[in-house]
Image: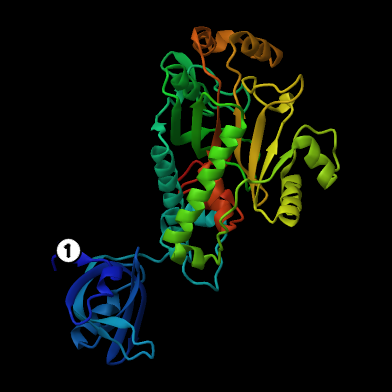
């Protein structure tokens, strides 16, 4: 059989009466005397193959589930009440024979735990429902690129091996770099700002970042894909929030239009949010939800969920900007509103923080002062501080976790499900 003439099952369904070649995985094999069936699966769907020829039925004796085959035959309506098309087999070629599977990934009655699924992720990904997660993720990424490109942003790619920690000395991966010490980037922050210093005005990046998160939670990973943008000549941090609103509306509209089948697999309904998204200061949030630790500087995971419920009831909205974080829990480069408060925000989506953003401090003398207050030494990143001597426009930006957006769209329990091969404190393989 000529493998180059193979078409996808999705295409085959439009070729009634035609002779075709399809290829994929033998999901089910059933022999019933003088007739046999194979349910063939590829990444576009499944198709029943009906076998009437005795010699071809005999060939199925050695065929195992999940073996890869090529099948040639004629597409015609089957005898099912649905009138669905099937392939009447004329020729069969076994490309590879599969051994007994170590996990079940299609049987709905057998639930394999996530850890074991991740051990055999290359098999788990054969599950159409798992594949749907990555179709959604792909569309989220592409929609983000389209949004920023169409809005006049330039896509950049910043270094991931750094001479010093990009955020702080905490949660950073250190590595040997020839005869020097180096670190994996915790964010592209300093380089986004450098791009604005150069006069690019509007930049964005989609790339990997690394956090040495020691705690094993359903919300954190040691490596994740971050969507970042930075923009110059802003009036205030409201400009950043306005862009974020437009971005999320664009992403969700695109998902709703292009991923109907994938959303259906998860029984997920996408609500297109209205502008403006609700805004609530950290101080107001503490009072509104009556948190048990009013003196804390931030909200914990449970309190974010409580706040989301409060916003949903009051504003009928799935998003909320939590604003004016204390300087104590924000980086030195966030602009201060007053002595203790920053012009910064988190964007929560269904009770999960998906974005952190802020207006940056662009004035050299103030930036140096804030760094000193935070115990950040200019000697660690002299080039970063030096650039602010040469004229920097008011600017700001944000960082968003692509996986977190996907998790909330599909209401998944664990962020690891949104990453093809996740990395956490225990997992570095496959």
Left or right: residue 382 compared with residue 58:
right
The x, y position of residue 276, in whole percent, is: 62, 45
Q: Looking at the figure, which quarter contains the N terminus?
A: bottom left
Disc tally is: 1
Please name the residue shown 41% across and 16% down the image.
Answer: 178
Please name the residue shown 25% across and 73% down the image.
Answer: 12
What scheme was used to colour the molecule?
rainbow
Which image quadrant for residue 244?
Answer: top right
Residue 188 visible in rendering: no
Considering only vertical position in the picture, is 35 above or below 86?
below
Which image quadrant for residue 61?
Answer: bottom left
The x, y position of residue 285, in whole percent, is: 78, 41
Considering only vertical position in the picture, is 421 above or below 96?
above
> Which is nearer the eye, 353 or 280?
280
Residue 257 visible in rendering: yes
Q: Name the residue at the left extreme.
A: 2
Left or right: residue 7 compared with residue 198:
left
Considering only vertical position in the picture, is 163 above or below 357?
above
> Which is nearer the eye, 389 or 134?
389
Please name the residue shown 72% across and 31% down the image.
Answer: 325
Which image quadrant for residue 145?
Answer: top left
> Which is nearer the eye, 326 or 117?
326
Which residue does the numbered mark 1 point to in the structure image? 3
Left or right: residue 148 compared with residue 389:
left
The x, y position of residue 214, in whole percent, is: 63, 36
Please name the residue shown 59% across and 37% down the image.
Answer: 241
What element does badge 1 sit on? Answer: helix
The x, y position of residue 296, in whole percent, is: 81, 33
> Which is nearer the eye, 61 or 425?
425
Few, some or many residues within 10 Å of mark 1 (<14, 14–19, 20+)? few
């Amino acid at each position: 059989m000529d493998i180059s003439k193979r078409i996808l099952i999705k295409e085959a369904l439009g070729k009634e009466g035609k002779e075709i070649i399809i290829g994929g995985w033998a999901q089910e094999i059933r022999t019933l005397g003088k007739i046999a069936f194979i349910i063939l699966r590829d990444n576009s769907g499944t198709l029943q193959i009906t076998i009437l020829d005795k010699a071809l039925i005999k060939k199925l004796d050695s065929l195992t589930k999940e073996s890869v085959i090529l099948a040639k035959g004629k597409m015609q309506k089957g005898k099912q009440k649905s009138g669905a098309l099937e392939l009447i087999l004329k020729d069969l070629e076994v490309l590879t024979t599969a051994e007994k599977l170590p996990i079940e990934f299609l049987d709905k009655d057998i639930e394999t735990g996530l850890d074991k699924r991740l051990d055999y992720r290359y098999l788990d990904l054969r599950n159409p429902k798992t594949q749907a997660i990555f179709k959604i993720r792909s569309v989220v990424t592409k929609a983000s690129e389209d949004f920023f490109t169409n809005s006049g942003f330039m896509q950049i790619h910043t270094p991931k091996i750094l001479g010093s920690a990009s955020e702080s000395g905490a949660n950073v991966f250190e590595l040997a770099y020839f005869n020097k010490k180096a670190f994996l980037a915790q964010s592209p922050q300093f380089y986004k700002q450098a791009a604005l210093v150069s006069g690019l005005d509007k930049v964005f990046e989609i790339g990997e970042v690394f956090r040495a998160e020691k705690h094993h939670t359903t919300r954190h990973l040691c490596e994740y894909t971050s969507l970042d943008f930075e923009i110059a000549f802003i009036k205030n941090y409201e400009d950043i929030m306005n862009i974020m609103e437009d971005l999320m509306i664009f992403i969700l509209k695109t998902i709703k239009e292009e991923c109907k089948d994938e959303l259906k697999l998860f029984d997920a309904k996408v609500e297109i949010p209205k502008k403006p998204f609700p805004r609530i200061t950290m101080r107001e949030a503490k009072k509104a939800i009556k948190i048990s630790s009013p003196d804390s500087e931030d909200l914990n995971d449970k309190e974010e969920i409580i706040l989301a419920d409060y916003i949903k009831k009051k504003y009928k909205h799935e998003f909320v900007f939590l604003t004016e974080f204390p300087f104590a829990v924000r980086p030195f480069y966030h602009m201060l509103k007053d002595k203790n408060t920053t012009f910064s925000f988190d964007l929560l989506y269904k009770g999960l923080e998906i974005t952190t953003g802020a207006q940056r401090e662009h004035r050299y003398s103030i930036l140096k002062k804030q760094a000193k207050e935070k115990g950040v030494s200019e000697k660690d990143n002299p080039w970063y501080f030096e650039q602010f001597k040469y004229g920097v426009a008011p600017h700001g930006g944000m960082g968003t976790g692509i996986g977190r957006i996907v998790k909330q769209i599909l209401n998944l329990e664990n962020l690891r499900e949104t990453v093809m091969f996740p990395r956490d404190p225990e997992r570095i393989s496959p």
